[in-house]
Image: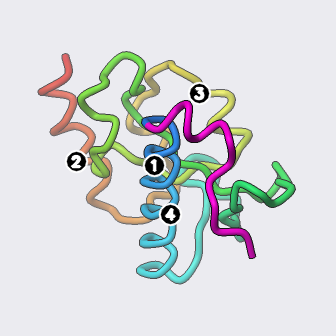
């Protein structure tokens, strides 16, 4: 098992730190919930891939910043703003802001309330 960072991570330490932060979040959710599923579409059995593994986009677990970090950089590491998403949903959403109701399969019923609460701060 590889433990070193990839070469590009030394040139982009902030990007690498965010990837590691996101991965830690996914591990915590998996530990608490027993599994990872897309909170948008409900796709089950998502997997956390390491940087050196070949990724299967059909089953990869990603972290979506519900309020995009490109528009709200202060929320980049705010786990209240994190939604577990499959690759397809995260790719569709990109930097857009969806309605909170698009979270049809929340891992925790309080996520929608947290996002509405955050919305008061970001608007």
Q: Secondary structure at mark 4?
A: helix
Q: Residue at x 68, y 31 (%)?
A: 91
State the residue position of label 3.
Answer: 93
Q: Which quarter of the rendered picture does the N terminus lie within? A: bottom right
Q: Residue at x 61, y 63 (%)?
A: 37
Q: Please provide percent x and percent y for residue 35.
A: 58, 76
State the residue position of label 2.
Answer: 114
Among numbered discs 1 and 3, the one appearing first in the sequence: 1
Q: Please provide percent x and percent y for residue 56.
A: 85, 55
Among numbered discs 3 and 4, the one appearing first in the sequence: 4
Which residues, given as a range, are shown in magenta? 1-13
Q: Secondary structure at mark 3?
A: helix
Judged left or right of residue 72, residue 116 is left
Among numbered discs 2 and 1, the one appearing first in the sequence: 1
10 Å crowding of disc 4: few (<14), some (14-19), many (20+): many
C-alpha span from label 2 to label 1: 11 Å
Q: Please provide percent x and percent y for residue 48.
A: 65, 64
State the residue position of label 1.
Answer: 83
State the residue position of label 4.
Answer: 26
């Amino acid at each position: 098992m590889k433990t070193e960072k990839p070469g590009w991570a030394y040139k982009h330490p902030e990007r690498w730190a965010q990837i590691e932060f996101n991965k830690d979040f996914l591990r915590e959710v998996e530990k608490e919930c027993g599994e990872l599923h897309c909170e948008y579409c409900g796709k089950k059995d998502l997997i956390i891939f390491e940087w050196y593994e070949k990724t299967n986009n059909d089953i990869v677990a990603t972290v979506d910043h519900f309020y995009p970090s490109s528009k709200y950089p202060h929320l980049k590491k705010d786990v209240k703003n994190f939604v577990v998403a499959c690759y397809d949903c995260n790719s569709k959403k990109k930097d857009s802001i969806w309605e909170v109701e698009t979270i049809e399969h929340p891992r925790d019923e309080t996520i929608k309330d947290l996002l509405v609460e955050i919305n008061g701060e970001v608007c």
